[in-house]
Image (tube, rainbow, N blue to C red):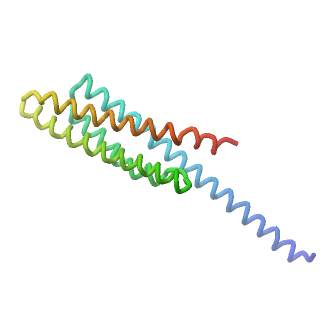
């Protein structure tokens, strides 16, 4: 084996090693961004709960729900690679979260308009908003139940 052949093999092995490291680093960066986005959504969900139950501040509910809605596509793009059946389930949860959040925003806007006119919102509208929030949280918990454990196992050494 010549030195030039050995050098070429060494460079090829180095390139493969660096490619694997770059791929792992990129996945690690995506995982960090994914976890940050999910953490932000958790804080926004708590903010919605607080403002619906205690503050009756539906402008804040709308703002927090809008932030979650903006994160939905980000969550989808940052999600770990999943095989086709898992990817379809994950996409279903993403679509449900998006729809439920859009509905909550709509109810919050309606309630906020009524509040601005110094009137009391109809209780059924507030109940519908609360139900939409419940659907959002159910979607989150269902998705986490299905995927979080599997993703942690996959990430473990």
Residue 19 in which image quadrant: bottom right
Count of all numbered marks drawn on residues in the image: 0
The picture places residue 133, in percent across and down from the top left corner, at 30, 35
Q: Where does the image place residue 89, in percent across and percent down from the top left?
A: 47, 49
User: Quadrant where the C terminus lies?
Assistant: top right
Q: What residue is shown at x 73% (from left), y 64% (from top)?
A: 16
Q: Residue shown at 90%/75% (left/top)?
A: 3
The picture places residue 121, in percent across and down from the top left corner, at: 12, 30
Q: Foreground: 102 or 6? A: 102
Give the quarter of the figure containing the N terminus: bottom right
Locate residue 31 relative to residue 16 in the image: left or right. left
Q: Is residue 6 above or below residue 70?
A: below
**Residue in the image at 30% along x and 38% along y:** 64
Q: Is residue 93 left or right of residue 52?
A: right
* Farthest residue, direction front: 85
- Whether residue 103 sits left or right of residue 124 in the image: it is right
Where is residue 10 drawn, in percent x and y? 82, 68
- Above or below — where is 8 with respect to 63? below
**Residue ID at (73%, 60%):** 17
Quarter of the view holding residue 45? top left
- 17 sits left or right of 79 in the view: right
Residue at the right extreme, as displayed = 1
């Amino acid at each position: 084996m010549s030195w030039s052949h050995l050098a070429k093999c060494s460079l090829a092995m180095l390139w493969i090693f660096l490619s694997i490291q770059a791929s792992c680093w990129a996945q690690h960066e995506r995982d960090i961004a994914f976890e940050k986005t999910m953490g932000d959504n958790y804080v926004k969900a708590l903010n919605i709960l607080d403002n619906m139950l205690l503050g009756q501040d539906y402008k804040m509910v709308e703002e927090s729900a809008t932030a979650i809605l903006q994160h939905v596509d980000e969550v989808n793009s940052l999600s770990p690679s999943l095989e086709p059946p898992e990817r379809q389930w994950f996409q279903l949860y993403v679509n449900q979260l998006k729809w439920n959040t859009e509905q909550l925003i709509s109810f919050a806007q309606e309630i906020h308009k009524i509040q601005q006119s110094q009137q009391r919102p109809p209780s059924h509208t507030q109940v519908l908003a609360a139900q939409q929030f419940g659907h959002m949280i159910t979607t989150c918990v269902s998705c986490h139940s299905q995927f979080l454990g599997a993703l942690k196992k996959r990430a473990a050494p």
